[in-house]
Image (tube, grey):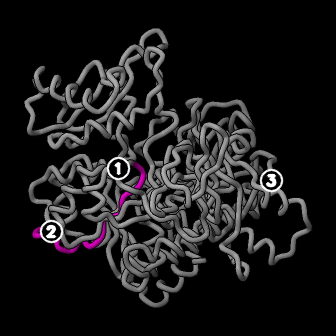
Amino acid sequence: MINVLEKIEFFASKSPDRIAFESVRGSISYGKLWECSEVLAGRIGALEAEGIVRRGEPIAVFGHKEPEMLVSFVACARMGHPYCPLDRSMPESRIKDILAEIGTSVMIRCEDEEAKIFQVPESILGEKCRDSAYHGDPERSSTCCDDSLNGKSESSSTGCDDALDENVMYIIFTSGSTGKPKGVEVTSENLGNFLEWMTGVATDIGEKEGKVFLNQAPYSFDLSVMDTYTALASGGTIASLDKEVLANPARTMDFLREKKPEYWISTPSFVDMILAEKDFTQENFPHIHVFYFCGERLTKATAEKLMTAFPDSKVINTYGPTESTVAISQVEIKREHIEAEDELPVGQVKPGTTVLIGMENGEIATDKEDGKIGEILIEGNTVAKGYFRAPEKTDAAFEKTPADEKFYACEKTPEDEKIYAGEKTPEGSEGSKSRRYHTGDLGYFKAGQLYCIGRTDLQVKVHGYRMELGDIEANILSMREVEAVCVVPKRSDGKIRSLTGFVVAPSMEGTFGDGKKVKAHLKELLPEYMVPKKIKFIESLPMTANGKIDRKKLEEEA
């Protein structure tokens, strides 16, 4: 298992001047990252001594692609405080919801080249701790690498009385079915086990040292964990795209030319946008050796275009939810995958993880049983602790396995704890077992490869017929003219009345006849009730701040 703090300290000593992170908002070396994080950690320790912050209490970190965000993450980890990243691009209402959920006493704001510590008023401390609305008035601030603390506070820690876990590395919030976010608690062991595997994907960890890793996702999206910590654990440099640059394709291309990333990490939707630039080819960007994709389905159309533009680069498809620490499988996409009947695989499951398929009849299929479709269930050493201060949500999604029940029922030694956490694997064992996470993703195994074909929550019922939107999208994508597609329901009076397909097909004019052509294609492949009532042609699919397709916006336009 990789200890990322030890790795950062090692590279700070070995190569102190090597750049660890750079964006248009600034850069920081490994030496300065370790030095600044030590100073900020000392301030957090002072707040503990004053009784303002309790050990293990989450600390919110607010900003957008500043080097100080990285300093804050490392400082929190050094002091045993989970950090909770809040990106400036997030809606204010969501930020308030998250602050209310974690009930933190302090937050760090990264702005003006400073990491400022704010005391959060009692009014923010959450529905579960206080009834409130956020005022956001700072009572305390400090500057990175400045020994002084500005301002004093006489208040004591006012967080919830729930037990706090110093072993939690970070808390990232995902969308909940109720509309309220859920905070996923990822432990240091979860991250360390993920990095033990991820640093060896596509190339080994030694080859990654000193290389440049592209960061596209905001820190509030767990895809950023893949590039940020893989780079830091390998002694690489993070080249981070901020939202202003991302909003301008020309500026994005200039950034890529200047920073020359060798490892590309993004959502498929983001690379789709960049592939629209004719200059995005291996000839013009020879430094890009590996493309890693996660967070969304990688389509054959995208993979084929990328492999044509970059014939000598590796295209790696990965899969995993936030609740199992970014990703748990990977595969290098080859031409045979493009030509196969199945959608692209998401790959071979990593060591230390077991994936099962839960079918509607209650049966559980293993990776040895090909073609059995059901919900993807994940066990292993990167499955998260659960949802922060949400035991009911945790129990609903994280099922205890027989091994888990036995572990909790018996008296444990320190060695048992290490084995269970995944820090140590007993001789003759395939790895530690943990709770079983129910992903809500639909998938199956074939020839040792995992395939993810959609979401259980993207199943809809129209006029009494149940269907999977991903199935319809995959069949539209099988048209050579189509580059991207999203099918959404059109609702009225709380019911789904029809489906609308939004299609990106630059070679088609988007006429009524083109819409009929798409429908005719679908009628040859699917039952008529699965054919969308409307086909709308658009230049590109809208994306969320995380780089995923914005389905909610498309529903509004359906």
Q: Real-space Cα distance between discs 1 and 3?
A: 44 Å
> Few, some or many C-alpha atoms within 10 Å of disc 2 (few <14, some 14-19, many ≥20)?
some
The answer, for residue 387, to whether it is visible in the render is yes
Instruction: From this view, report whether residue 302 is shown above or below residue 440.
Output: below
Q: Position of residue 200 (x, y in %)?
A: 45, 77
Residue located beneath label 1 in the image: 343
Image point (31%, 58%), residue name: 241
Q: Nearer the viewer, residue 432 or 89?
A: 432
Q: Quadrant of residue 134?
A: top right
Check disc 2 and report its element: helix, strand or loop: loop
Q: Is residue 161 above or below residue 417?
A: above
| Circle 1 SS class | loop
Q: Nearer the viewer, mark 1 or mark 2?
A: 1
**Picture coordinates of residue 191 (x, y %)?**
58, 67
As drawn, 159 above or below 428: above
Q: Which residue occupies 71% across, 30% down?
A: 131
* Amino acid type, label 1: Glu
Q: Nearer the viewer, residue 187 or 159?
A: 187
Q: Secondary structure at mark 3?
A: loop
Say if mark 1 contacts mark 3, CB within 8 Å: no
Q: Which mark is residue 282?
A: 2
The residue at the far bottom in this view is 14
Q: Which residues are magenta?
A: 283-296
**Residue displayed at 52% across by 77% down:** 34
151 vs 556, left or right, is: right
